Image: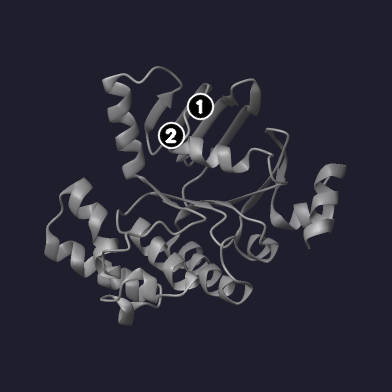
């Protein structure tokens, strides 16, 4: 039996007196595409940010690719473990967060050079191949300001992949895009899921993407995973009224 690449146990997150995550337990297998969906404020983006410790969990533990970290004080050993976890965990944000003073190619090369200390020639070759994969080989020497939002987000995906992570996290990657640009980013994500068998955890309201690409959908409601299942099960026969109401509203 395949060992899960992500294991989350009793994960809690509070901001002051507001408890946003109320005990999340989930296993995700290698190559699985999991879509997280739900209303704003349900905890899905907070959960995603807790996976790579951009948000510190209040309680519980996260294990990714064999690196197991429990909530706790920021010791030197724990900080080192978080760095090791992040190396295996790429993230794509709502905003593209590209370095404006760098070319597209330099943006993609930066992390493997700085964080991993890899040879420049090897990193350059991989970065050019990734830009070709996302349809932007001809933009390698451009600066981000000269690109559309959809192109910038595709560069952000290539940049995350340049670290060769075992897991990719996507936090509403199309929410900042104009409607006509959404399809080009979703197309890249579909190819990533189907051609590369990349483990992906995706927060999105794009239910067409979920229906076509997801192996599993998790409905977040008031800080818990309220219901989960395959797209076929969720779209055709969601059990909980809250899930059905949400899907009826967004489809």
Q: CA distance from mark 1 to mark 2?
A: 7 Å
Residue at position x 69%, y 52% in the image: 230
Residue 51 in the figure: left or right of residue 160: right
Give coordinates of residue 30: x percent, y percent.
46, 48
Q: Give the image location of residue 99, x and y in percent.
A: 32, 59
Relative to 198, 209 lies left or right: right
Assign a secondary structure to mark 2. Answer: loop
**CB under 8 Å between callouts 1 and 2?**
yes
Residue 157 numbered tag: none
For the residue labelled by badge 1, is the local secondary structure a helix, a strand or a loop?
loop
The relative height of residue 48 versus residue 76 in the rendered view (above or below) is below
Q: Residue furthest bottom?
A: 138
Any mark on residue 53, and which?
2
Task: Compare residues 19 and 51 and report the one nearer the observer.
Answer: 19
Q: Which residue is mark 1?
A: 57
Q: Is residue 213 above or below residue 9?
A: below
Compare residues 60 and 212 and report the one nearer the observer.
60
Please state the total of marks drawn on the protein image: 2
Residue at image coords 80%, 46%: 243
Residue at 84% across, 57% down: 248
Q: Is residue 33 left or right of residue 72?
A: right
């Amino acid at each position: 039996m395949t060992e899960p690449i992500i294991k989350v146990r009793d994960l809690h997150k509070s901001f002051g007196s507001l408890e946003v995550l109320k005990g999340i337990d989930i296993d995700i297998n290698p190559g699985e595409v999991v879509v997280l969906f739900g209303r704003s404020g349900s905890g899905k983006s907070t959960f995603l940010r807790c996976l790579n410790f951009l948000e510190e969990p209040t309680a519980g533990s996260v294990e990714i690719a064999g690196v197991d970290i429990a909530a706790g004080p920021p010791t030197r050993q724990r900080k080192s473990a978080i760095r090791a976890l992040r190396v295996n965990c790429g993230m794509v944000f709502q905003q593209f967060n590209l370095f404006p003073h760098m070319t597209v190619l330099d943006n993609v090369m930066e992390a493997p050079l700085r964080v991993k200390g890899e040879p420049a020639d090897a990193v350059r070759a991989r970065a050019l191949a990734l830009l070709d994969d996302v349809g932007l080989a001809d933009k390698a020497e451009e600066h981000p300001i000269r690109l559309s939002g959809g192109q910038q987000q595709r560069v952000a995906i290539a940049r995350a992949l340049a670290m060769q992570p075992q897991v990719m996290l996507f936090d509403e990657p199309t929410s900042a895009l104009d409607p006509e640009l959404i399809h080009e980013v979703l197309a890249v994500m579909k190819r990533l899921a189907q051609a590369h068998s990349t483990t992906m955890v995706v927060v999105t309201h794009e239910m067409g993407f979920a229906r076509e690409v997801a192996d599993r959908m998790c409905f977040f409601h008031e800080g818990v995973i309220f219901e989960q299942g395959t797209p076929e099960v969720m779209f055709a026969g969601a059990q909980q009224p809250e899930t059905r109401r949400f899907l009826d509203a967004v489809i």
